[in-house]
Image (cartoon, helix red, strand yellow):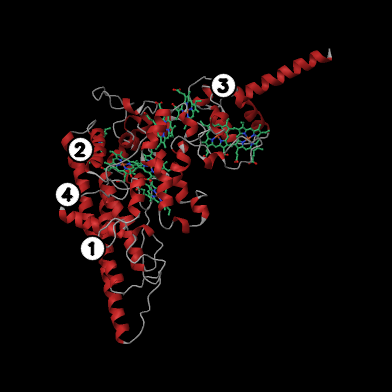
Amino acid sequence: MKIGRWVVLMAALAAASVAAFCARPGAGAAAGAEPVIAEDSKACIDCHTQRNLSGSALRDWRLSKHAEAGVGCVACHIPPADAPKEVSRSKSVCEDPAVRRSVSSKSCAKCHPGQVSQFQSGKHALAWVAMTAMPTTKDQPQPLIEGEKACGGCHRIGRDEGKCDSCHTRHRFTAAEARRPEACQTCHMGFDHPQWEMYSTSKHGSIYAVEKNQWDWEIPLKDWFAKPADASLKTPRAPVCATCHMPEGDHGVKTAWGFLAMRLPERDAAWMKDRATILQGLNILDQKGQPTERLKVVVAGKVARLSAEEWQMERDRMAKVCVQCHTPTFAQEQLALGDEIIRHCDRLMAQAVTIVQGLYKDGVLERSKEYPPHVDLLRFYEVKYPIEQKLYVMFLEHRQRAFQGAFHMNPDYQHWYGWAEMKRDLAEIRHEAETLRAEARAQKAAGQKPALKPVGAGKIRVRREQP
Ligand code: HEC
Ligand code: HEC
Ligand code: HEC
Ligand code: HEC
Ligand code: HEC
Ligand code: HEC
Ligand code: HEC
Ligand code: HEC
């Protein structure tokens, strides 16, 4: 009877392990559904469970619609033939040599071709390229970029042709999580793009904060406002990030003005002149107004809108969102006010660029070989003098806030953290330039070579506020 006992024991063991795999703690993606352990992924799950590896992957996958539908580990972790080489050639510590840790959107494309192609048409797909194209990215320590601890941590969304776990966190991959504005906050916050702070303290965000627990997050975006007359507290009455930026679930995010609020051409002549000065400051036009090599990067990374049609298409898409709740006139007026603010900001910015540019031209600020002979705002903080640091902060922190605050219905960001700070920057830059010129004159009169102050000698005030 020995053999019989073995059979019974093995059967009991098998039943116990199946029960362990199928246990669904808490409420699953769809109540009651059992995970389907795909044949190809059984070995992964067995070994990882036995060795107590990747508990979060096992648990969260089990709670996902993927588990319910029989989509196992292999579907994502064994790269398809067309995966980017960064993924297929990467090293892995898994005992199964075919496994890769990195997953690209190519793994999802087989089953979700629509979302993948929309994503590819939008700005998120360009995020890694845009980051690496910046002139000083290569000078940053590797953990900040490749290691994804800083720039790379946010720009990874565009790495390896798209990281789809940026809004739907792995391994649950729920749509409901991604509809929440918090799905965007880790990246869209802080110094140069505080959309989370602006939104969450706007009127739209305040309604979200008060009523979010009553809203049904399982409703697809396209059905949120389909029947405005059917009043229900389950349907959101204020927009979230995805309402405005992913209308009807469109994964191709892009706005009319974009990150730096640059479009060409500008019909108004005075504004066009200011825009040209700023484009020179960005090193996209040279000092004669001719396009530089960097224009190629701008085109490839879709950093600026280069035709009136391209800009208008995105504006119309946005206005359509607002009119689900507001009247067309109200919406157009509100958006046009944002455009006007950019014009006023550009006036201040162009003046500041011209002042600093004048210091190089007149030899008051020295330009050594490793620096371009003119203002280069895209070098960010990799500049020498306090006045250049101030110029970069004026551009990347304060100008950004002034227009982004207007578009996100946040009067305080628009004004006190944006416009008012730009005014202060310009006054300080003007004063600093006059001081530098006076010092240079005095040194020249005394027959000395100008002794320039290194970065840090001047006072740079960068305010940080909490959300
Ligand atoms: C025989 C045991 C075993 C099997 C079978 C196995 N793994 Fe692993 N896996 C490991 C071990 C061990 C590690 C390394 C853990 C560590 O030290 O970080 C690992 C690591 C991983 C990693 C992280 C890799 C990295 O480089 O960080 C992934 C992803 C992974 N496994 C997925 C899978 C998938 C998918 C399968 C099935 C196709 C699978 N594993 C099959 C043992 C196994
Ligand atoms: C729908 C796709 C998908 C499925 C299915 C999937 N994963 Fe993953 N997994 C990912 C993504 C995306 C990442 C992040 C990889 C990156 O950074 O590119 C990841 C990362 C991991 C990691 C490394 C990170 C960590 O937190 O340790 C492990 C280990 C892992 N998965 C194991 C598994 C196992 C085991 C299964 C099966 C139970 C599984 N995965 C199923 C998409 C998937
Ligand atoms: C992992 C970080 C990350 C997350 C999460 C993220 N984004 Fe982004 N987003 C970026 C980066 C980086 C860019 C800039 C890409 C580029 O232009 O090269 C960007 C660009 C954008 C743009 C384009 C702006 C333009 O230039 O026109 C929009 C709109 C946007 N994101 C909206 C969202 C929304 C809405 C969410 C949440 C549902 C979200 N993002 C989640 C990192 C992220
Ligand atoms: C907290 C996350 C985060 C960090 C850190 C970060 N970025 Fe970004 N970056 C973003 C987001 C989000 C956007 C888009 C914001 C918007 O459109 O308002 C963006 C936009 C950009 C753009 C403009 C792309 C375009 O097409 O308009 C460039 C270039 C860029 N970042 C480079 C960098 C570099 C270089 C670093 C590090 C020195 C860095 N970023 C650090 C999140 C981040
Ligand atoms: C082998 C096919 C397959 C692959 C590969 C796959 N999925 Fe899925 N995915 C599905 C199925 C099936 C569903 C469930 C559909 C449903 O219930 O409507 C699903 C559902 C989803 C959902 C919606 C879940 C919800 O809450 O409604 C998201 C988000 C998702 N997948 C993301 C991804 C991402 C990201 C990848 C790649 C990293 C991926 N999937 C890879 C088949 C796949
Ligand atoms: C910027 C955030 C963000 C990123 C990045 C993102 N998604 Fe989504 N995803 C969403 C939102 C929001 C929804 C809900 C859409 C809706 O309600 O129509 C969603 C829904 C989905 C769904 C469910 C669609 C349905 O009709 O049920 C799938 C599948 C999906 N995404 C796949 C992907 C894939 C594949 C990628 C990578 C190419 C990806 N997502 C990247 C935000 C994101
Ligand atoms: C009520 C609609 C609405 C909501 C909600 C909203 N935005 Fe925006 N967003 C806009 C408008 C309008 C613009 C400017 C569009 C243009 O250029 O015409 C914009 C622009 C942007 C840009 C480009 C740079 C900028 O700020 O001008 C990013 C990135 C962005 N939004 C991300 C987000 C994120 C992340 C959230 C949520 C935290 C969010 N938005 C919430 C309407 C909205
Ligand atoms: C889901 C519906 C919805 C959408 C979509 C929406 N809003 Fe709103 N909006 C509201 C609600 C509700 C309020 C709060 C009204 C109040 O303050 O009494 C509001 C308030 C505002 C306010 C504050 C001033 C005021 O009249 O109270 C502005 C400005 C605004 N919205 C502009 C926009 C713009 C521009 C868009 C499109 C980019 C937009 N909204 C999209 C519902 C929406």
Task: Pick whichever of labels 2 and 1 is earlier in the sequence.
Answer: 2
* Residue at left offset 25%, top offset 48%: 263
Residue farthest to the bottom, as pictured = 446
From the image, tell me which residue sits under label 4. 267
* Residue at left offset 71%, top offset 18%: 12
Q: Secondary structure at mark 2?
A: helix
Task: Pick whichever of labels 2 and 3 is earlier in the sequence.
Answer: 3
Residue 198 visible in the picture: yes
What is the spatial separation of the Cα atoms under label 3 and label 4, in whole angstroms?
A: 60 Å
Within-10-Å neighbours for mark 2: few <14, some 14–19, many 20+? some
> Which is in the foreground here, disc 3 or disc 4?
4
* Residue at left offset 30%, top offset 46%: 258
Amino acid on which the number 1 mark rests in the picture:
Gln
Tell me where residue 45 appears, x and y as whole percent. 62, 29
The circle drawn on residue 351 is: 1
Tell me where residue 234 appears, x and y as whole percent. 34, 26
* Residue at left offset 40%, top offset 43%: 126
Within-10-Å neighbours for mark 1: few <14, some 14–19, many 20+? some
From the image, tell me which residue sits under label 2. 331
Pick the residue in front: 294 or 176.
Answer: 294
What is the spatial separation of the Cα atoms under label 2 and label 4, in whole angstroms?
A: 22 Å
Residue 467 visible in the picture: no
Report ligand 7 position as a quadrant.
Answer: top left
What is the spatial separation of the Cα atoms under label 2 and label 1, in whole angstroms?
A: 32 Å
Amino acid on which the number 3 mark rests in the picture:
Val
Task: Pick whichever of labels 3 and 4 is earlier in the sequence.
Answer: 3
Q: Secondary structure at mark 4?
A: loop
